[in-house]
Amino acid sequence: MSFVWVILGFMLLVIGGEFLVRASVALSFKLSISKFVIGMTVVSFATSAPELLVSLNAALSGSPAIAINNVVGSNIANIGLVLGITAIVGSIAVDKTFYKLNWPSMMLFSIALYYCLYNDNQLIFWEGLLLFFALIAFLYILLRQAKKDTAVEEVDETLAIVSYFKITLWLLIGGAALYFGSEWLVDGAINMASIFGVSEAVISVSVIAIGTSVPELAASVIAAAKKEKAISLGNLIGSNIFNIGSVLGLTSMIKTIPITEPQILTRDIFWMIAFSAVLIPLILIPKQHQISRSNGFVLLLGYGMFIFLVFTQ
């Protein structure tokens, strides 16, 4: 029965990703801002909702390892698994906004999270508040910068005449599908993993993280297949920033999150920072300003190594 829930959850997440991509492109016409920014705000927030719900429930129910490892594991999966598969589907062009704002912001959020956890082995209210306000500042700068972007992008012109009602309906359908799909997928995966006696930390950084990253995978692969490459990259970078700033930020503001599993600080978080940092050399070598199919295979191989270490160490 657990396997059935996993399959049903995956199907709902694919449907949710499709509706979110449609709504995002249509919304970019209405607001006259770039698809990249839409991907980093609307889509990123919606696809980060499963992480928020899982982490908040875990923290309130006395399972802090799941709360932190879910986000750390999800951020690793977003780069290694999701971006890797998306790049294999089709190479992704990278614009200057990635170097000037998005990648540096993702690195700063990642390092800030490490410092907050390393400092006192917990994430407290004030640290969560700081992370959340940093997210608001990032979005403010992003939207201000978007107004200066006058580049014309090729998109599905039929979405230009979609009404606000239909856009809202698509967002609601997409959000609901992502919520229930993630619930079913994660619950089914936890039951399957528990049968093999896997620890809570291992489940959260691998099974749950992959489960809550499926929305990003669905949205990004669908966007890449439709040539909406800006949304593919923007969604992933934005989701990683949202995961730290909103998911852990809001969760720790409601309840302090202590470190209960040492490997979070000795292994997992360094993998998260490394996957973020390696994007720059991958983009510049061998072909500049592009995440190629070969880069996608490298990221996917790296993620496979991480999962292997998680289950064997």
Image: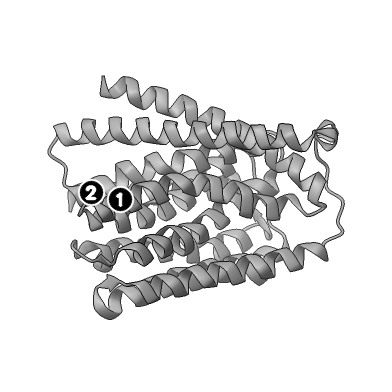
Report if the CB atoms under discs 1 and 2 are less than 8 Å apart: yes
Residue at the spot of label 2: 202
Within 10 Å of the Cα at label 2, are there few (<14), some (14-19), or many (20+) other Cα atoms?
many
- Farthest-out residue, left: 197
Residue type pointed to by label 1:
Val
Residue at the spot of label 1: 205
Spatial distance from mark 1 to mark 2, Cα to Cα?
Answer: 5 Å
In the rendered view, would you say 224 is above or below 7?
A: below
Residue type pointed to by label 2:
Val
Residue shown at 50%/73% (left/top)? 108
The quarter of the image holding the N terminus is: top left
How is the model colour-coded?
Answer: one colour
Residue 91, located in which quarter of the rendered image? Answer: top right
The quarter of the image holding the C terminus is: bottom left
Q: Nearer the viewer, residue 197 or 57?
A: 57
Residue 257, located in which quarter of the rendered image? Answer: bottom left
